[in-house]
Image: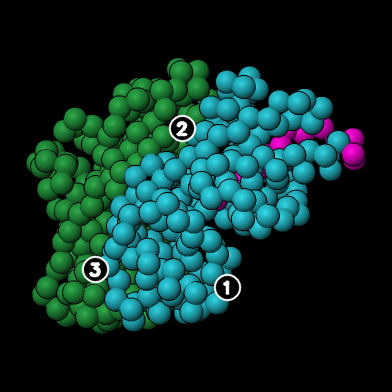
Chain colours: A green, B cyan
Amino acid sequence: MLASKSSDRRELFEQSGLVFEVLKTNVSEKQYKDKVSDPVLLVKELAKVKVKTAKKELEMKKSDAIIIAADTIVELDGEIIGKAKNKKEAFDMLKKLRGRPHNLITGIAVTETNDPKIVVDYDQTTVEFLMLTDEELYDYINTNEWKGRAGSYSIFDRAGLFINKIIGSSSNVVGFPMHKLFKIFKNEFNINLFKMMKG
Amino acid sequence: MLASKSSDRRELFEQSGLVFEVLKTNVSEKQYKDKVSDPVLLVKELAKVKVKTAKKELEMKKSDAIIIAADTIVELDGEIIGKAKNKKEAFDMLKKLRGRPHNLITGIAVTETNDPKIVVDYDQTTVEFLMLTDEELYDYINTNEWKGRAGSYSIFDRAGLFINKIIGSSSNVVGFPMHKLFKIFKNEFNINLFKMMKG
């Protein structure tokens, strides 16, 4: 069970051939964002809260499942960069990120219904943009790809045109560090993810 | 015009929102592979041959287009790793790559019909796998994702589960360095790729 509203994340799971269902939890992220300023602690905390919420819901319905949740933020020099509300904010955000390495940090949490154990981990990928001109930034923003995305870009869509370099796991950049999931399933739940794939 | 048989590459162009057509050229790669042993020289040469072949075909048909071609190889310690012919070869290949950083090198060539100029460039991304067990390698091979792919894996599909780290451009790993294309179009053809995107 994937407790996530992100369509990028759902697509990544589908491309990995994993069989899963999506559960959309309603977690108010704001209260945590106001309390926790450390990027890594924040994404881990949010992933944990999401997975717990989903677990409670499933246990009430008496459904059994392994539940996976995640939260991603963009971090630049210790500052958390969220989602833009409008084109102006998206432009300011991309202008800040342009030509400066920044990090995509994802917290993940995995648990099982009727099992108190919750495994929490995170992954970090550094991203560098080409030094785009203001005009090019506007052109990109006009594609509307910034909407609903932390940092106002989507790496494997149009933003691929100006992403110069990444250092770290490739799946994390799309929204979920699949190699971390592989390791958690193997080491903590004794499950071989390759065996859970569609043919 | 994209002169390429690769479905991964086509998908990448589509996700970038670029409007393009695909032309499948028939270039016998073997003669070049026998002659050129340097990985970078080889992919550049193959991209150039492909783009020239496509150009000749288009000029004969009197169609005007910008033509893009590419060739990707996997390189480990100077050795070129091609495509596996069967499961046994795929297993040996992945076993070699497991736990050892290797490079994905793509040569690209861009030209225009009725213009002698051909721009050739390349891009390189380093990839690291988790240290999979033999059994896990077999499980992956049984998904058949190795078929038709240099190095016998597909990074944004199931192989995401065991790709630990990449260093370099993210689009190159999918099959085409989009940021290089962006720069070539801008600097050599005076074309803003953002303006050529679907809305």
Question: Image point 35% across, 41% down: which residue?
Answer: A166
From the top left corner, tell me how far across and down residue A7 is, in percent: 43, 54
Residue A166 visible in image: yes
From the top left corner, tell me how far across and down residue A22 is, in percent: 38, 66
Cα gap from disc 3 to disc 2, whole angstroms: 32 Å
Q: Chain of mark 2?
A: A
Kind of residue at badge 2:
Phe
Q: Chain of mark 3?
A: A
| Residue A42 relative to residue B89: left or right | left
Cα gap from disc 3 to disc 1, whole angstroms: 30 Å
Q: Chain of mark 1?
A: B
Cα gap from disc 2 to disc 1, whole angstroms: 35 Å
Question: Image point 35% across, 25% down: which residue?
Answer: A99
| Residue A43 relative to residue B96: left or right | left
Binning the other alpha carbons within 10 Å of mark 3 as few (below 14), some (14 to 19) or many (20 upward) gives: some
Disc 2 element? helix
| Extent of the magenta region | B60-72
From the top left corner, tell me how far across and down residue B130 is, in percent: 29, 64
Which label is found at residue A160? Answer: none
> Where is mark 1, residue-wise?
B85
Task: Please say if A135 is above or below B23.
Answer: above
From the top left corner, tell me how far across and down residue B82 is, in percent: 53, 61
Which label is found at residue A162? Answer: 2
Kind of residue at badge 3:
Lys
Residue at the top extreme, as displayed? A134
> Where is mark 3, residue-wise?
A183
Q: What number of labels is visible?
A: 3
Nearer to the camera, B57 or A125: B57
Question: Image point 57% across, 55% down: which residue?
Answer: B8
Disc 1 element? loop
